[in-house]
Amino acid sequence: MHIVKPSWLTHGGELRDFEVYSCHVSPDGSRLVTAAGDGYVRIWSTEAIMHCGDAGYSNPKQLAAISNHSGTIHTVRFSGNGRYLASGADDKIVCVYVLDPNPPTHASTFGTNEPPPVENWRVVRRLIGHDNDVQDLGWSYDSSILVSVGLDSKIVVWSGATFEKLKTISYHQSHVKGITFDPANKYFATASDDRSIKIFRFNSPAPQATAHDQVHNFTLEKSITAPFESSPLTTYFRRCSWSPDGNHIAAANAVNGPVSSVAIINRGTWDGDINLIGHEGPVEVCAFSPRMFYKSPVGHAELDANGHSTQVSVTVVACAGQDKTLSIWNTSFARPFVVHHDIAAKAITDLAWSPDGETLFITSLDGGVTAAVFEEGELGYPAPLQENEKNLSKYGAGRKAGVIEGTDALLLEERSKAGELKGVQGRMGELMGDAGVSKPAVPTNGSIDGPRTNGAVDAQAGTNGTTQAPPVPPPAERKVNELKSRVTWVNGKKRVQPTLLSSSGPSASESSLPQTQLISATKQGVKSDSPHAVLDLSKPYDGFPKGGLASLLIGNKRKFAEVEGDEEKRNERRMGSQAQSGAPPILLNTPDGLVPPSAAIQPQDYEVPEPLRPAVSNPALSVSQVRMAIPLIRSVIVRTVDGSEPPPQASNGADVTPAQRTEGANEEVVMLEARNATGPSRTGRHQDKDPTRITCTKRGQSLWQDYLPKPVLLLTGNPKFWAASCDDGSLFVWTPAGRRLVNAMIVDATPVILDCRGWFLLCVTAVGMCHVWNMKTLSAPHPPVSLAPALDVALHVQGMHLTHAPGVVFARLNSAGRIIVAMTNGDGYSYNPQLFVWQRLCEPWWAVGSQYWNTTDAAVGNLQPSSGAQPQSSTSAAKTSPEEDNDEVSPENVSAGIIPLLERNTTNHTLVRGRAYFLQRLIKALLSAEGFEGFESCVSVAHLENRVAAALSLGAREEFKVYLLMYAKRLGAEGLKAKVEELLRSLVGDVFEGEGGDDADEEAKEMEQTLCGWKKEELLKEVVLVLGKHRDLQRTIVPYARLLDIFDKRAAVDEPQQMITDV
C-alpha cells in the first residue's frame, strides 16, 4: 500500500486549512470531489493525484471550485449515472450540479486566488426541504432518487429526474447522520443518533413520478437497535455502507459491551451478530469497496460452463473514525489485514473508493486529503462486474416491480401515461398563462430538457419541469424596413422621422419600464385530483400601491366632489385653509370624490323586523328526548322565489306596502311577505289578535293575498309552490297563483326549519321529527324520521336532566327529496329512504386523518349540482325549464355539490375553530407509533371509499365520477390487487352481454348498465386507463382492456406516442 498525499490537495485558508468533511469519486474514476468548511465544492483530477510525484506532469490539478452554499458543506455525492453531483450543507439546502459542455464564462472568482476553472459545473436545482443541517446524501444505484438526511431528524426523498420532493419521512427521533443504498435497488438504510438504523423498502419511481404517486412507496421494513444501545452521541457522522453483493451492511458507531465496533448487519434477517472490533474510539465512517475480490488469479481450470469463476469471492470494507486509524477488513479473515495508525492528525470524516476498488481516498478534520493506493493482489484479485450482477440477481436487481407481459400491456401503459401527461401539461400551461403555446417535448428515459430550478426563476432554467425558450429577436429585414419607413423626402431633401425613446426597443408597444408577470388563476372548468402545491412566498413582491395602476401613475390624492350650489368651490378652499393651519379636515370618501360630512347623503334607517314574542311551547317538548330551539315570532317575514336576499325595507318604522317594498329591487323577482299582527287586540281579549296577512308581489303589484288566523314563523317557496308554518304546528301550501294546494297540515310540534326544493317540502319540528312531502303527488316518500340518531342521542344517558348535544347548522333537501343535515360538531348526515337509516357522509375523522381532505379542490369545488337523482345517459339528459334551473342554483340549496358543502362545514366547525385539537394530536402521535405504519394510507383509502358511496347514494352524478377516478388512482398507487379486481367487476355488470330479448326488459337492462347516471362502459374504460400504467396490476387489467377494444382504437389518439422501452 502506498500513501499519496499531495501538498496542494487541500481546502486552503489564510491561517490554516479548512476541515474536509466529505469526498467521493465519479463513476468513471476521473474526478475526486471534496467538501469542506470553506463553503467550496472542489473537483480534482485523480490522474493528477496519482502523478503528484511527476515533476513533468502539466495537466490541470483542480478542475473546478464551486461556491453555492452559505456555510460548511458536509457531504458531496456523484450520481450513479455520472450525470449529476449533489452537495448538502449547514444552510439546510441541497444543491444539484451538472457539467456544462460549454467552457467556463469566467477565468477565476473575483477577489480570490482560485485558479481558473477547467470544467463548467453549474447549479441546476436548489432543493429546499430540511429545517436544519444536511448531514449526508445518497443516490440510488439507478439514479432514480436522491435521499438527503439531516439534523432535523428528517429523511427527504427527491426525484432523480425532476428533483421534486416525493416524500418526507419522519421515523427517526434524533439527528440522522448517515445513509446507504442497497446495490440491488430494493432498500436504503439510515443511521441516527436515536441509536437505530432503519431499513426502508422502495420501488424506483418513474421519471414523471409525483408525491401523489409515491404515497405508499418508501415504507419502513425494519428498525435495528441492538448493536447501538449504548453507542456514544459524540460522532459527527454515522456513515454506513452496503456491500457490493447486497448481503451485508457495515454500520458505524456500534458497540460490543464497552468497546467500540462496527456492526455487520445481515440482509433479510437484519440481525447484527458479527462485530469488527479493534478501534479505540468510535467509528464514524465505513466504506465497502465497489468490487469483489478473489484470493488468487482465476485460471481457465477454475471457470464453469458459463464462464464464471468457481472461486469464492470476498468483499473488502474500510473503517475509520475518531481514533485517526484506518482499518481494512475482508470476509476471509477475522482480523484486519491493514491497520494504519495516525494516518491523519484529527478524526477521519469520510472514505471513498475508486471504481476499480484498489484506491481509497481519505478525508479528515486536519484539512488533508489522502489517497491509499494498493498494489495488485494486496487486497485480492478483482472479480469481474458480472460477479456483482450474479450475486445481486438473487435479490431481484435489474428487475422492475412489474414486468410487461405482452404487447397489449405495453400499449395500455403507453396510453395511460400519455393521457396523464397530457392532463398535467394542460393544467401547467393554464397555470403559467401559456394556453396558446405549443406543448413541450416529452422527456424520455429521465432526461431533462434544460436545467431546472427549485423555488427560483432562472434566465436559463425552466420552472416546474418546463423549459422556457429564449425570446426570438425580430429578423434583420424587419428592422431595415422599419428604418426605411421613417425616411421621408421634403423639397428634395432626405428627412428622418425622430423616434421616441419608449418605442426604440424591439417592440413599439413594449414599455421600457420593468414588466410585471402575473400568474393566472386556475380556470373553473379544470379538474385536478392531485395534491395542491404550496406557493413559494419567501421572495419579495413589489406590487401596485393601493388604487392599482392609476395610483402608481397619478397618485392617491382624491379630488373634491362637485356639490350642488357650490360653484365657487368654497368648501374646498375652506378645507385647504384648515389643512394649512395644521387641523386635518374631516372628509368623507364617496364615489364622486371627497365631500364634507354636512354635504354627504345620510343613510336611511331601515326597519329591522322586531321579535314580538316567543312561540307557544308545544306539550310534546316536556316528554321528548330531543328539544330544539324555536324561532321567535317576527313582525315581518319576507321570502323571494329564487331564495336570494330580500330587498331592504323602508325607513322610519312606517308601515310599508308590498309595492313600496319592491322599489329598488329586481322588478322580476316574486316575493312572499307574511306580516304578523303587532297592534293591540280589537276586542279587548289578548287572544283575539289580527290575522296574519300573506301577500305575494311582483313588479310592485300584488299578485294575490291571503290571511291566516295564527302567527307565521317560517316561509319558503320556489316557482312551484309557496309554504308557511305557524306557531301552532300547522302548515299551509299555495300554488304560484295563490290557490291553496292542500288542507292545513298539522305536525307534532312547532316547526323550526322549513325548506323546499323542486316539488319536495321539508319541515323539521321542535322535537326533532323530519317530515318530507311531495307536493306534486301529495304523498310522502317515507314516514317521519327523528333527528335523534344524528344528534348523538345514543351516546348520552337517557336521564332526567337535559344533556348537551350538537346543534343543527342547516337541514336541506336535494333534488331527489333526500334530507341533508349538517351539525356543529362537523358531522354531516343524509337519510336513506331505501335503508330507513341515517348515513354519516362526513366527519372530523376524515378531516384530520385523510390526505384527500381539501374542500377547495378544483375537481370538486367547481362541480355544478346534479340535475336529478334519476340516472341519465350521457347523451340524453333530461331538459329542465328556466324556472327549474333557477331553483337548482338557488343560494339556499346546494350549489357546489352536497359532499363538498358538508366537508366545508366540517372544516369551518372543527379545524378552523380548533375543536379537533386533541384529535389532531392523536393522529399525529399514531403516524409515528409502532404498528400504525400504514395508518394514514388506510384512512385515505377509506375516505375515498366513503366519498364514492356517498355520491352514489345521493345520485351526485358529476361528483361520483371524480371520486371514482381518484379512488382508482389511489388503488393503483397502493397496489391493492383485490380491491382493483373487485372494482372492475362491479363496473362490468351486463355491459358485455349480447343484445336481444323482450322490449319490456330493455328499460330494466338500460338501468342496470348505468351507474349514477353514467354508462358503466364509459366508467370502466376510464378506470382501466387510469390503472394501466401500474405494471404489477396489468395482469388483472389487460383482459378488461381487451373487452373494451382499447387497443383497436389506439389509432384514434391525437398524436403518436413514443414506445416505452425501459422495461
Image (cartoon, grey):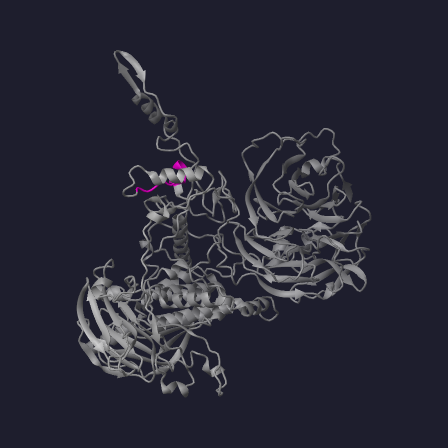
At which x and y percent is residue 826? 45, 70
**From the viewer's perspective, is 683 left or right of 821?**
left
**From the viewer's perspective, is 74 left or right of 159?**
right
Residue at the spot x=63%, y=42% of the render? 70
**From the viewer's perspective, is 259 left or right of 60?**
right
At which x and y percent is residue 542? 47, 42
Residue closest to the far top: 492
Asked if residue 398 is among those painted magenta in the image, a careful observer would answer: no
At which x and y percent is residue 813? 32, 73
Q: Quadrant of the N terminus?
A: top right
Q: Inspect this view and state whether residue 317 appears.
A: no
Relative to the observer, which residue lies in front, 736 or 204?
Answer: 736
**From the viewer's perspective, is 527 left or right of 582?**
left
Count numbered badges in the picture. Answer: 0
Relative to the observer, which residue lies in front, 1001 or 378?
Answer: 1001
Residue closest to the far front: 684
Q: Inspect this view and state whether residue 1037 appears.
A: yes
Question: Which quadrant of the view contains residue 928?
Answer: bottom right
At which x and y percent is residue 84? 57, 45
Asked if residue 554 is among those painted magenta in the image, a careful observer would answer: yes
Relative to the observer, which residue lies in front, 551 or 157?
Answer: 551
Question: Which quadrant of the view contains residue 1052?
Answer: bottom left
In the rendered image of this protein, does residue 950 appear above or below residue 432? below
The stretch of residues the image draws in magenta is 549-562
